[in-house]
Amino acid sequence: MGSKLSVNNHRADIIGLTYIYPVLSRRAGGLSIGINFNTNNTCNWRCVYCQVPNLSIGAAPDIDFELLAKELRLFLDDVLHGDFYDRFEVDADKRVIKDIAIAGNGEPTTLKEFARAVGLIGQIATEAGVFPSSDYVLISNGSLIHLPRVQEGLRVLNEYHGQVWFKFDSATEEGRRLVNNSTQSCQAAVENLLVASQLCPTKLQTCLFDFAGRGLPDTEKQAYLEVLKQVWEHSNVRRIMLYTIARPSAQPEAGQLAKLPADILEAFAGEIRELGFEVTVSV
Ligand code: SF4
């Protein structure tokens, strides 16, 4: 009680719930309600900048739907009709629910009953009057979108006017292994991106940073721009979010990572804009 929920306070357990955590997001300019399916801190990737502590390779455990529903109803009621904003001393101009974001401590699409969970959240947020005025976002590494059960989830997300933020940090096989510890090929990732964009509005999110002093290599930039040309031609994806690391990584590589300067990100954003894309940069 009386804790200040600031943009720097991302503690998932601040309200003591299993699946729900509030984030005051600089990106969103208000309250973002995070939903975490990966309560066991598992992901099918291991990005070197990942902030999830004790991250292990794996999938989200089966979900307790009753508990998820109960927590979401209670939390929305607290925010909309209770004293949540006062208890956490939220600034007056941030007292708005900007989005409900399925994100959390791992890759959410590893959840077996992913589509059912997306539908339940959509239904409860609609009943509470949060949707459609607030956004419904899935933050995903996109690696499982070839699976029918994940595609079903994106169809449900689309029914609630949701959107996918698709992680795409590198367009080279070497970069994807180095940064994401992913063995999925770049071509497979692009195919998944195209599928996602056919099912639901989709944006790219790209984290760029200095890893062991290599900066932003020209080979990475050129490969990324080449892939974007394909994306432009074959999909309706038009928006890209470039960002750099903001908080410490919980991975062993943490000491080798540094933010990229704003001017480097802005210069690269300029090159991407020349292809026609709308690009936001956050540093
Ligand atoms: S995809 Fe997300 S949760 Fe998974 S390792 Fe990367 S940053 Fe962490």
Image (cartoon, rainbow, N blue to C red):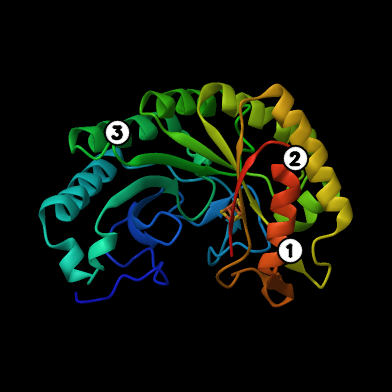
Q: Which residue is mark 1?
A: 264
Q: SS class of the residue under badge 3?
A: loop
| Quadrant of the displayed image that contains ligand 1 | bottom right
Q: Are marks 2 and 3 in contact (CB under 8 Å)?
A: no
- Of badges 2 and 3, the one in the foreground is 3
Where does residue 189 sit, x and y in percent of width and height? Answer: 71, 35
Q: CA distance from mark 1 to mark 2?
A: 28 Å
- Could you tell me which residue is drawn at 57 percent across and 39 percent down? 203
Where does residue 63 sit, x and y in percent of width and height? Answer: 37, 42
Res 181 seen here: no
Q: SS class of the residue under badge 2?
A: loop
Q: Which residue is mark 2?
A: 184
Is residue 90 toward the left or the right of residue 202 in the image?
Answer: left
Q: Which residue is mark 3?
A: 132
Q: Amino acid at mark 2?
A: Gln
Viewer-side residue, 96 vs 170: 96
- Of badges 1 and 2, the one in the foreground is 1
Please tell me how many numbered marks the rendered image carries: 3
Q: Quadrant of residue 120?
A: top left
Q: Characterize the local packing of mark 1: few (<14), some (14-19) or many (20 or more) Cα atoms within 10 angstroms.
A: few
- Could you tell me which residue is drawn at 42 percent across and 72 percent down? 8
Q: Amino acid at mark 1?
A: Ile
Q: Characterize the local packing of mark 2: few (<14), some (14-19) or many (20 or more) Cα atoms within 10 angstroms.
A: some
- Of badges 3 and 1, the one in the foreground is 1
